[in-house]
Every structure is written in structure tokens, then in C-alpha cells.
Image (cartoon, rainbow, N blue to C red):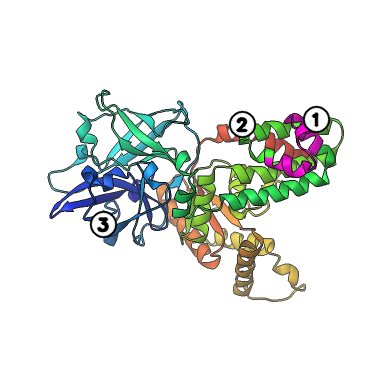
Amino acid sequence: MDKNLLVQIFVSTGVDEGEIATGYPIAKNRILTARHALYPDGQQPHSIEVRWCHLTGSARSWRPATFVEWDGSDEFDVALIECEFPEKVDRLGIVSEGKLSNKMHWCSAGFARAGERDDGECRSVGMKGEVFSMADSEPEFELGAKYEVSHDEQWKGASGSPVFVGDKIIGVIVSCPENFDARRLRATPLWKLLQEPGFCEAIGYGKRKERLAWARRELTSILKRSTEATEKLADRLRLDTRLGQNRAENLAEALLNHDIEQILDITYQVAKELLQGGNKPAVDAVRQVMSTILPAIFDHGIIESVRTQKSAFSCVTVSLPIATKTVTEIVMAGVDRRAAKFHMAFDIQKPEKRRLEAAFRIELPPEVGLDRSRSDFINAFHRDLIGKCGVEDDLVPNQRVPDKELIKSAAEESEARSEEDGQTYYYIYALPAHEMDHLYYTDGIKQLKNCYPSVVFINLTGAAVSEERSRFRPYRKILETTSV
């Protein structure tokens, strides 16, 4: 959680009177908070103002905000408010539609009454604890508060605080239930909100239907080309007698109605069976099915957050709560509405070793370090993108072209491929451990972003390496078997 982005909200109820609440930015000029906090005692507020008091400069000043209506907004104790974001708010919180688990640990911060200071300075209060899972029919879930306040009233002002698990927002704090000595809080789950078309439209997350429609068409085409793969997948789903005449279309629809774990298991078992029979074309068809379905059904909130920051929010980098390169390619494929695309590459340091490489990921040689001038890093980046865009393929040997012309051509080509062909180039990184090196790294990335506005620079912040690798191992195994 980036506490610098925490929003303090003042809801005016009269002259010099009002209530404090908390919010967090999740889309361009959109702040997520608790609905009841905007209507003290059920009354219309005189006005709403917000500020980012953990930032500096004009961001600390109060600015007006307005309530954003969306279809179904009165069914949840959650609200969106709109204001013009200050320049320093150059990143957003990423909301997730992941379901809740009792194994989760959450953290947050909010402007609870317990943190009020006599000098009037705002101070947020940190919160953390355990998540209690919920039945799907329940409107809210419970949080165990590890460091509770003295009594319920001291939580007042924390309404609207984002519930983070790792770097993903899974809920919004809305109340403190009675009879728990202030050791429990209640929150609205984001997965329910992300199922609401009105909410998704209000935050610019309206591409899920288009992504599923694209996947349905692609899957139908793949399945029509491989009778063997269609028969095996239908048999595994026990749908063979129910598919009717439009077998490929109906199987595509059935596959899209399964979750990721089911898809990975079904397709992996079918691929293994086909591989044992020596039917490599059918195995490749199953690989195409996997590479199409995974970007279509992966966490909608994460994909849409990256997509909106890429297209509608002019940020230099995108922080992504993912830990591995494989899953990052799945996310970017979802953003572009395309199949995930990998090929086998040789390791420069160990030629006998082959590894999977995403087609649109910019990858620098391992020997390239980050010196203070950043020249090696920047030059290696230019070379890789110029090569991927095929700029020099259009030149004759020994033709002398200024570097700035090659860079300009690569920038134009990468933008055209992103906008017209759904092929966005991206660079993923993790910030160095030493804080001083952060400045050199981010400055180098800013220089590159100025050269290549369409390239997405992704800071991987996830830590669940073991979980992701274990979860997507079936996919990697099939990719390693079929990729060339």
C-alpha cells in the first residue's frame, strides 16, 4: 500500500462543521470511499472536499469533489467521488476481483479519530490483521483488527479506507460491528463491485464484455481447426452429448464459464493425453486455447487497472501486484485483447539452456547494469526495441542513419502496433534494494518513457513467487512442450 496516495475527505454539514472520512484513488479523477460517510446522519452534505495530506505542494490543499452516481450505487455502502487530481498523484490503487480467503492478511490506513492531534495536523492510523472469508450472498466481510482502538467511536473517520492484501485492494472499510470490543471491522468486497456494470463503467473498466467476446470468437476458430482437441476437451467437460450442431461455439462458451484453476487442470490433462498419443497438432491447439482463455478470465480488476493507466492516465510507470514474468504476459495480453504469446529463447550465458520469453516484453542483456549515467541501460533498451520493431530490417547494409531517427521510427512503430494491432511492448522491472539507486533507475525510465510513450513500464511489486509458479505450472509445461 502506498500511503502517500491516501485521501482525507471532509464532508461539510454546516458552517465550520463536518465529518472526516478516508478514500483512495483507483481511476483517473475517481476516489473510492464509503457511501454512508458522505451522508452524515443520512443528510445531504453541504459540500465535499479532499486532499492528499501525505504529499507536498498543492496536493495538500483542500479541493472540491462531487459524488459520482452509477447504476446500482445505492445497493452498496461504497461511493465514488470525482475531482481533478493534482499532478503528484501519478499512480493509482489496483482493485482486485479475487475471492477472500481465511489465509489472507490485510493492511490499511485511515484518518480514524484515534489519530487526531491537538495541533490540527492530519495523521493517518495504520491498520492490519486477518481476513475472514464470506459467503457469496453476504454484502460485506469481516476483518480482524490486530491493534484495536479503545472503543468503537475511535474508528470514526476510517470509513472508506482501502483494504489491501499485498498490493491489491480487495475491499473498502465501512463499519465497526458491535460486541467485538473494537477488534472487528466490516468491509465491502471489491469482487462484488467489479461484477456491477455501472461501477465498472464509472471507473472506466468497461472492457470485460469486449474481451470475452473476442475470446469467444478466437476459441471458436481454434476449436473448428482441431476436431481432436475439441473432442477431448468436450469429453473432459462431459459435454459431448450436449454440444449440438455448433460444437465449437458451444464448447468455447462452456470453457469461458470455468475459473482459472479448472481451465488449467482441464487443458493440461487433455494436452498430456494428446501428447502421449503423439498428436502434436492437437496439443498445439490446446496450447492456443490456454493462451486465449487465461487473458480473458484473469483478474478483471488488475487487467482493467493496467489498461486504464496505459491509455487514459498519463503515468510513467504502472505498479503491478504480480511476481512472475509469465503472469505479467497474461495480464498484458488481457490488456491488449490478444492471446498470450511466448517463444523459446537461448540463454546468452548458458547456450544449452532454453527459456520462455514473451514476444512483446523488452528484455535487456543480463550484463547491462545501471551506472549513474544510465547510458548502458538506455542504449540497450533502444537497441532491443529498434530490433523488435524491425526498423533496421528496412535498411540496406552500411546505411548510416542517425540514432535519433532510428529511435523516432521505433517509437512510431511501437505506437502503431499498440493502437492498431493490440501489441503493446512493455518492460518489467523491480526497483533496486538500495534507495539511492531508485533515483537513477526511475530517472532512466522517465527518459525512455519520453522517447516511447506507448511502451508500458511495469514495476513488479508482487512477492508470491511460489504461489504463482505453482498455480501456472501446467501452462508453462505446455508452453515448453509446444513453443519453438
The amino acid beneath tag 1 is: Glu
Q: Residues within 10 Å of mark 3 (few under 14, many from 20)?
A: some
Q: Which residues are magenta?
A: 230-253
Q: Is residue 139 magenta?
A: no
> Quick one: SS at disc 3?
helix
Label number found at residue 470: 2
State if disc 1 and disc 3 touch (CB < 8 Å). no
Q: Amino acid at mark 2?
A: Ser
Q: Give coordinates of residue 246: x percent, y percent.
A: 78, 43
Q: Nearer the viewer, residue 441 or 141?
A: 141
Residue that carries the numbered disc 3 in the rendered image: 60
**In the image, which is nearer the foreground, mark 3 or mark 1?**
1
Q: Is residue 245 left or right of residue 94?
A: right
Could you say where residue 358 lies in the image, as x and y percent from the top left? 66, 49
Q: The N terminus is located in which quarter?
A: top left
Q: Amino acid at mark 3?
A: Arg
Q: Position of residue 221 (x, y in %)?
A: 77, 49
Closest to the observer: 160 or 465? 160
* Mark before the other along the chain sequence, 2 or 1: 1
Q: Main secondary structure of the magenta part?
A: helix
From this view, report whether residue 134 is shown above or below residue 348: above
Query: Which label's residue is closer to the chain start, 2 or 3?
Result: 3
User: Sequence-wise, which precedes: disc 3 or disc 1?
Assistant: 3
Q: Residue at x 23, y 52 (%)?
A: 45
Q: Nearer the viewer, mark 2 or mark 1?
A: 1
User: What residue is at 50 percent from the left and 56 percent from the top?
Assistant: 308
